[in-house]
Image (cartoon, rainbow, N blue to C red):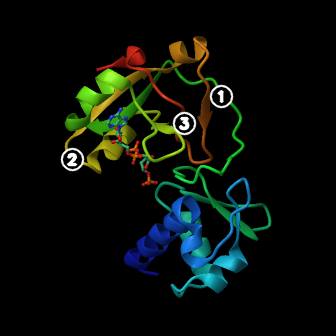
Amino acid sequence: MTEQHKKRISKFLSLILRHQPEKIGLTLDENGWALVSDILEKSKMQFTVEELSEVVNTNDKKRFSFNANETKIRANQGHSLKSIDLDLKPETPPLFLYHGTVSKFIPEIKLHGLKKMNRQHVHLSKDRDTAAKVGARRGKPVILSIRALEMQNEGHQFFISENGVWLTDVVSSKFINF
Ligand code: HQG
């Protein structure tokens, strides 16, 4: 399969598993799982179950997971759908986590902290390199350091997705080193 075809399938899966399952009449359960058979049947994009497996198993950010018997699939993070509960367990974060953004957002972030915007959580990275890539999607990246352990000690919860992205609610600017 070409990289281009894989990318098209990955983008399509992100759309239907994170944001708009109704686009193809798909139903997700409360934990975000869809039946693989439903996706293959309802998807107007032509791909096989083998191609779907290849996308899941070789995805650069491990965006998707199968359940144990590979009958169901879900996105590991990034949902805008409010009804999905990934059922993640709270975890203790490292001293610092990082957030990649761009300079035009900094004044707002200084005022209101990091907000979830359209997603269910604020997404944080475990290292600066990953944060730089996240920021670079929007222009020249600016990396913010978040005093995550201090936040947790003050009662804020952190979760880690299946693919290693740290998730939390709002990050007040008092925990951000600009
Ligand atoms: C910014 C990708 C103004 C925030 C990535 C970001 C990630 C504010 C944008 C995942 C703000 C939201 C998520 C505030 C935050 N005022 N702007 N108060 N608070 N922002 O895409 O973290 O490829 O929802 O800095 O790799 O960029 O999709 O979040 O620039 O893991 O798998 O508002 O998406 O993964 O943008 O990216 P997003 P994000 P995938």
98 or 53, which lies in front?
A: 98
Measured in 3D between alpha carbons, the distance from the residue under mark 3 to the one under mark 2, in whole angstroms, is 23 Å
Which quarter of the rendered image does ligand 1 occupy? top left
70 or 177, which lies in front?
A: 177
Q: Is residue 49 visible?
A: no
In this rendering, would 106 be left or right of 160?
left
In this rendering, would 24 be left or right of 86?
left
Location of residue 105 with respect to 156 vertically, above or below: below
Mark nearer the viewer, 3 or 1? 3
Q: Which amino acid, by three-letter code, is at mark 2?
A: Gly
Location of residue 116 with respect to 58 vertically, above or below: above
Give me the residue at 57% from left, 24% from top.
93
Which residue has dot 3 on it?
Answer: 167
Residue 157 picture location, percent across and down:
61, 25
Residue 107 picture location, percent across and down:
24, 27
Q: Which amino acid, by three-letter code, is at mark 1?
A: Glu
Q: Which amino acid, by three-letter code, is at mark 3?
A: Leu
**Tag shown at residue 91:** 1
**Tag shown at residue 139:** 2
Residue 29 picture location, percent across and down:
73, 60
For numbered disc 2, what is the local secondary structure?
A: loop
Q: Earlier in the sequence, mark 2 or mark 1?
A: 1
Give me the residue at 30% from left, 38% from top.
101
